[in-house]
Amino acid sequence: MEITQHHKTALLFGASGLVGGYCLQQLLKHPAYQKVHSFGRRKLDFAHPALEQHVIDFDQLEGYKALFLGQDVFSCLGTTMAKAGSKDAFRKVDFTYAIETARLAAEQGASQLMLVSSAGADTDSLFFYSRVKGEVERAARQLPYWSLHLFRPSVLLGPRQEQRIGEQVAARAMKSVSKWMTGDWLGQYRPVEAEDVAKAMLAAAQRLEPGPFVYRSDEIHEMAQYDKRLR
Ligand SMILES: NC(=O)c1ccc[n+]([C@@H]2O[C@H](COP(=O)([O-])OP(=O)(O)OC[C@H]3O[C@@H](n4cnc5c(N)ncnc54)[C@H](OP(=O)(O)O)[C@@H]3O)[C@@H](O)[C@H]2O)c1
């Protein structure tokens, strides 16, 4: 397997979302990438010469496998229980779609997977959301990637079009104390800008070291600050 640093093709899942949107912007201006293939259930209201958009049916992923050609996979898919409407529907997006897209891309030769999980991801958690995220991480570790980067953000900060009252209240409350949220335990719950998650994902992909790597929320924040200082 050849691990390249330039002229890479990125495969992006979830570009219409908050983290995914920032990932797309970052990818399109990053010198390591010459092409970005974005996969979603709807077309983005955005065009760029390096961007190729694919509207796909996530329940028929096998049929799109031939399009999953690239080195680095950025996976930002996800929903909420409120939007999904049931545990099964939530699991289908956050687990099945995330793992199946990554599995098919690996079969097509992708070597690095950058996947957004969540703070508290744990297969033994009492909380369904955290359990599913733990299961995603476990399944991702079993995929044949040369390098795997798992991101565990806490509450995401950033402009969202839709109203998510609970998240917004938590974000406001935690943002005011976030600079004191340090250390292994509190640091994992530090709220983080969605844009910083995207920056950390791109920075991780340029490490070119065999994974797996897991990044806590405070580490994601730090990676993005370090990346800003370098540029
Ligand atoms: N929100 C938080 O505070 C938080 C905290 C920790 C971790 N996370 C995790 O971080 C990740 C990214 O979060 P985010 O807030 O950026 O997500 P988001 O804004 O809700 O975007 C999610 C993406 O997944 C796609 N998606 C959702 N349901 C789909 C379906 N049924 N079929 C196909 N695509 C579907 C969305 O497409 P459409 O635009 O077409 O719906 C969108 O592109 C998620 O895995 C989330 O669980 C979030």
Image (tube, rainbow, N blue to C red):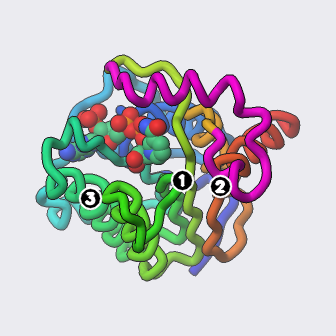
**How far apart, in angstroms, are the residues tagged by discs 2 and 3?**
23 Å
Tally the numbered discs: 3
Q: Is residue 166 magenta?
A: yes
Beta carbon of the mark 3 residue lies under 8 A of ligand 1: yes
Q: Which residue is mark 3?
A: 97
Beta carbon of the mark 1 residue lies under 8 A of ligand 1: yes
Image: 63 above or below 219: below
- Category of crowding for the residue at label 1, using alpha-carbon neighbours closer than 10 angstroms: few (below 14), some (14–19), many (at least 20): many
Instruction: Tell which circle, 2 or 3, labels the residue nearer the N-terminal end.
Output: 3
**How far apart, in angstroms, are the residues tagged by discs 1 and 2?**
7 Å
Residue at 47 percent across and 23 percent down: it is 169
Q: Nearer the viewer, mark 1 or mark 3?
A: 1
Answer whether labels 1 and 3 touch (C-beta < 8 Å). no
Helix, strand or loop under label 3: helix
Image: 230 above or below 133: above
On the image, the x and y values in percent for residue 104 come to 31, 70
Q: Give 218 or 149, whichever is nearer the viewer.
A: 218
Q: Which mark is residue 119?
A: 1
Q: Amino acid at mark 3?
A: Tyr
On the image, the x and y values in percent for residue 196 come to 64, 37
- Range drawn in magenta: 163-190
Q: Which residue is mark 2?
A: 216
Answer whether labels 1 and 2 touch (C-beta < 8 Å). yes
Q: Quadrant of ligand 1?
A: top left
